[in-house]
Amino acid sequence: MSETDSSPSEFASHDWWDHYQETVNTDEEMQVRGHDKFNENFYVEIGDDRFLIKMDGGKVDDVVANPGMNEEWSFGVEGDRTAWEEFVQETPPAFNHEIIASHYRSAVQNEDGHLQLTGNNKKIFQNLRAFQRALDLMRKTNNNGGGL
């Protein structure tokens, strides 16, 4: 992961993503859900910043800030910074507490302020449990182990 200008404790800073990688890679539930088969790279877009999460066997291999055209991913989650900050709260507000609920509000109800899934729908749903857990662990990372 390349350096950013963010402070170490700031959401989505370089150090935050390092902590996220450690959180995912040591999470017992993720080991069950990822079960060595979750190998689909995905991205999270937080406002104007995109982060590629490279998965290998249910573990985060690397996080790449603002990936280039030669990087590959199967799907992603996009939202403004406020929606992401709500999503990673220890107790998030309704409809920003879970990715499918948030996506529904954004894609179906056409409401602002929610996260939206993009990319290969088949791969999203083939990997949904592990993908959801990986996203939920963003909350745990942001709250120093709390919330999950």
Image: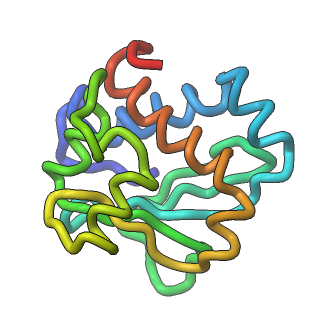
In this rendering, the count of numbered labels is 0
Relative side of 35 to 148, left or right: right
Of all residues, the one furthest to the front in this rendering is 109
Relative side of 40 to 22, left or right: right
Q: Residue at x 74, y 63 (%)?
A: 126
Relative side of 120 to 20, left or right: right
Q: Nearer the viewer, residue 7 or 94?
A: 94
Q: How is the image coloured?
A: rainbow
Q: Residue at x 13, y 49 (%)?
A: 82
Q: Residue at x 31, y 35 (%)?
A: 88
The image quadrant of residue 111 is: bottom left
Q: Nearer the viewer, residue 60 or 106?
A: 106
Q: Is residue 126 above or below residue 68?
A: above
Residue 46 picture location, percent across and down? 26, 58
Q: Residue at x 14, y 65 (%)?
A: 112
Task: Look at the image and tell me whether residue 4 can be seen.
Answer: yes
Residue 52 picture location, percent across and down? 49, 62
Residue 105 picture location, percent across and down? 28, 62
Task: Look at the image and tell me whether residue 50 can be seen.
Answer: no
Q: Is residue 38 above or below residue 48?
A: above
The image quadrant of residue 127 is: bottom right
Of all residues, the one furthest to the bottom in this rendering is 69
